[in-house]
Image (cartoon, grey):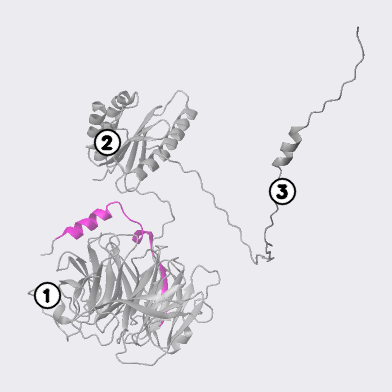
Amino acid sequence: MFADEDLDSVSVESVWRKSQQGAQESRACQTPAVTTEHAGVQTGSKTSRFTQTEPQEQMDPKRVFSGSGSDPPGLVDFLRRVEELLIRELEKNSRSHAFDGFRANWEERSQQVSHLHRLEHPGAQEQGLHVTAVSWSCTGSVIACAYGRTDDGDWTNQKSCVCLWNLDRRGLRPKQPDLVLDVPAAVTAVCCHPERPALIAGGLYNGEVVVWDTSRTQDPVLAQTGMSADSHREPVYQVFWVPLEKKGEFGVLSSSSGGRVLLWTVDPDQGRMVLVAAYAFVQQQVPHSSRLKARGGSTVGVTATALSPWDPDTFLVGSEGGLLLRCSFSSQTPAAVTSEGRSVTPRAPAVFSFRPSGGPVHSIHCSPFHRNLFASAGTDGLVQVRSLLQADPLLSVRVSDSYVFQVQWSPSRPLVFAAATGRGEVQIFDLARKSLRPAGTIQDGAPGRTATCLAFNSQNHRLLAAGRSDGSVGIWRLSSELMEQRPSESLQLEQIANQVAE
Amino acid sequence: MADVEETLKRIEGHKGVIGTIIVNSEGLPIRTTLDNSTTSLYARLLRSFTTLARSAVRDVDPQNDLTFVRIRSKKQEILVAPENNYLLVVIQNPSE
């Protein structure tokens, strides 16, 4: 029943491979050649710097002064407990005399003024030069002394110098300055920069203003005004460094007896001083009060200037005719002078005129302890303590019979000032004392030589430098009494300032 | 709260008082009549000073304790009423 049979083979075509192959396509692409270049770099010099901030102790502002919030617990009870005790102690204090006149000795006290050094420059002394100005550097260790003549009325071609001594150096040689800057004319004013100890500004007899940089070894002259149409024509009697609007920059203010006060900035690259502002004083523009009579010619020769440390806009000016003026830097009235080729038009800054003194004003200084007080000194032998608010002086102190060349308030005691007189003495007055005699007199060497200038050291309050006409500068250490502030001095100063002159 | 203000006013109105500060146990000022920088300076310094004074008194005699601290300087006098939790600092100018 079952039989073998052969059947044909059946084949099934593969559809899969064809569809795969059908989907294949080949493509080729190529990018254009990439250009490469090699360059090598190497650092020439390297510096490493690190900074790190320290965690600041911040008071959480919400925890402090939580006046309106809830009081910490127990505060009321604490106050109740403590109040009675405290009020009792306060009462006792206000009535107690236990500590009257008691002072603790933290430092060794010296009773007298002692002479430390006598600095001389033999070269200048041979030429018979006087010391015309002294200035301490901002660090308080270097003193700069300017040489010239104070008694000449004429043009001279005499060369002079500015000498520097560093008093903190061990090998201090009083007869040999540490640095001598040669100057082609007599120097009439010198002032050290308040922040950079290497810069010194000086005013010369021929009207130039020069800035020296003592850190430069080759040519210490950093900038000078030269004899341009802008500069002074008469001796420059005072120079000051004033802060400019841009913080950290200082300009030089120079005043001369030609009646002009100029403000310069230093351009160190070109070695020039660029005039920024000019102020000119003309007799007609000086504010007068009815009973003052002005003396002198049409220009007001400026012999003394002072800056106020409290108000950057005010400056005081004293003239050859005895006028004392309060001026403002920001005044806009143009001055009544012909501006012959000057780059900046001069302005008239005088705002208020004080009662004139009896002779040329040689020196003015604003008190560092009271906004309104300043002292002025002139050839009448008086030092007048005046207030910026009144025309008449508050106090006149007779310092000597001869001229007074410079007056300066002490930087540590509000009631003390020192005056350099024509008899060669430096008199130190203490307004706290009732008597009119000086608290201290500094006499150095032969009498009869005028003391022409003085300067207190603002860093080290014990030192005072005084220059004389015999070409020597004396460095003195003051006694503790003249240096330390007493408890009620500020009050007394306030009382003096509030006096109304009759 | 009103009590606190009243009490402080009574103290501040006293003759010669320049300023008052209340400091908590951590040395942070809670109330003050002076400016911020002076206040934080006084608070920090006086807290550690008072702790030192207290340990000095107790080391000498353990039964004793600090009740009041007065620091007299040339220009003014500082009075501190101490406690564990708070400090009351009053600065007075006694010569007025």
Residue type at tag 2 = Leu
Q: Is residue A495 magenta?
A: yes
Decide: few, some or many residues near mark 2? Use Cα within 10 Å; few <14, some 14-19, many ≥20: many
Mark 1, residue position: A288
Res A133 → quadrant: bottom left
Between discs 2 and 1, the one toward the N terminus: 2
Residue to which mark 2 is pinned:
A90
Kindly identify which residue carries mark 3.
Answer: A26
Within the image, what quadrant is residue A170 found in? bottom right
Classify mark 3: helix, strand or loop: loop
Q: Secondary structure at mark 1?
A: loop
Task: Give the residue type at disc 1.
Answer: His
For this rendering, which residue is in front, A388 or A438? A388
The 10 Å Cα crowd at callout 3, few under 14, some 14 to 19, many 20 or more, is few
Q: Nearer the viewer, residue A190 or A21?
A: A21
Precedes in sequence: disc 3 or disc 2:
3
Near mark 1 (Cα within 10 A), the count class, few <14, some 14-19 or many ≥20, is some
Magenta residues, start to end: A471-499
Q: Label 3 vs label 2: CA separation?
A: 104 Å
Dot 1 falls on which chain? A
Q: CA distance from mark 3 to mark 1?
A: 107 Å
Say which quadrant the N terminus of chain A sits in.
top right
Which x, y percent locates residue A459?
41, 63
Q: Residue furthest left?
A: A290
Residue at image position (20%, 66%) is A386
Q: Position of residue A88 (x, y in %)?
A: 26, 31
